[in-house]
Image: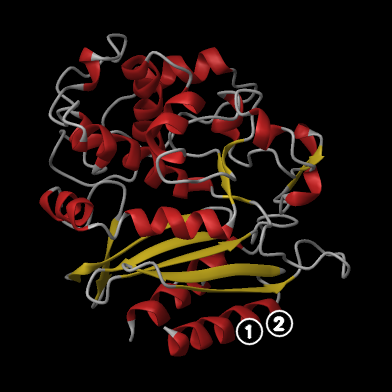
Amino acid sequence: MQTVMENLTRIGQRLIDQTPLVGVNMGMVTADNQKAQTALGLRDANLTHPVQANTIYDLASLTKLYTAAAYVQLVRQSQFDLDKTIQTVLPQFNHPEITFRQVLQHNSGLPSSVRKTNHLTRDMLLSDLYNRELMSAPGTEIHYSDVGYMLLGEALKVLTGQPLEQAMQQLVFEPLGLHETGYRTPQMPELYALPTERFAPTENVEERGGLLQGTVDDFKANLLGGAAGHAGIFSTLADALKFTHFWLDPEVIALLQANRFDFRTLGWHYWRFGGEDNPSIEQDWLYQTGFTGTIMALNLKTGEGLAVLTNRVFPDRTVYDRWRVDRYQFPQAFFAQ
């Protein structure tokens, strides 16, 4: 672990020096719960604001892993069948054939996002969510889908009879001991009450009042009140490592491997290499990324997990194309041991 962390630290410092990042908080955890972590750089552009061990980050699409974990918990409690159709829980959804398993695997045929329109409202978003046209027949192709995971979040509300925040608290945050993880909404008063300074800022968005700090970056999650199945969760590195450790449980790993579809499983993406035309898939290496600059990865060969938290969109997203390439240096170094 020490050698890998040294390599990860060099990568993080180089990206800070080259300016895609202002700072990074990252660490590793083993199946027997040994941990190593480091904090580099700054929270923002102020030299007096170093990254702290307890800095809280917007996890962006890593939220999908937490949503997947909620369904894994339901399955483990023998309370849920993943082959149930979405429409049996959300009757307003207009595709009766799509199952929860397909949505979790990103092979439901649902598109990536809702339609982009000016002045989008919550009601418009939900209407579009339930009525999107499919890109392919369910169960045939992979299309990474925010829409699907938003539906999973809406379904959790119905399945538990609670707001999404409480459903996730009951199924994931509390059982895993994640005390500084959640949605920053009034439904989660402890996180909501924390000072803004605890949070790494993301983007400066004029139409949303300026710099986003402690406010969800994703516009769709924001329209849904800050809590959604695809984005919206905030966390510290310590909690992120606890969460990553959850996925190293043999019973959970068995569920992941049993639910693989091509290069996808429940929430996770299998590592691929060898070119886009005919890539090879490493079935023991999994990862997921978030738009704000967050990464989680699992090495099932070594029984280790990785969490990398950054706010690479600070102060704006103009370096995104560069980051799309740079970010893979972290899981590559993690897997190459």
Q: Would you say 76 lies left or right of 317 here? A: left
Classify 101 as above or below 162: below
Residue 94 position, x and y percent, is 26, 14
Classify 243 as above or below 87: below
Residue 103 position, x and y percent, is 26, 35
Residue 300 position, x and y percent, is 24, 69
- Kindly identify the amino acid type of the residue bearing the numbered disc 1: Arg
Secondary structure of residue under mark 2:
helix
Q: Nearer the viewer, residue 83 or 142?
A: 83
Identify the residue under disc 1: 14
Secondary structure of residue under mark 1:
helix
Residue 135 appearing in the image:
no
Identify the residue under disc 2: 17
Q: Would you say 132 lies left or right of 80 here? A: right
Q: CA distance from mark 2 to mark 1?
A: 5 Å
Name the residue located 59 percent from the left edge and 18 percent from the top edge.
121
Work out which quarter of the rendered image holds the N terminus and state it: bottom left
Marks 1 and 2: in contact by CB < 8 Å?
A: yes
- Kindly identify the amino acid type of the residue bearing the numbered disc 2: Asp
Name the residue located 44 percent from the left edge and 16 percent from the top edge.
162
Residue 62 position, x and y percent, is 45, 50
Q: Give the quadrant of residue 310.
A: bottom right
Name the residue located 71 percent from the left edge and 82 percent from the top edge.
17
Work out which quarter of the rendered image holds the C terminus and state it: bottom left
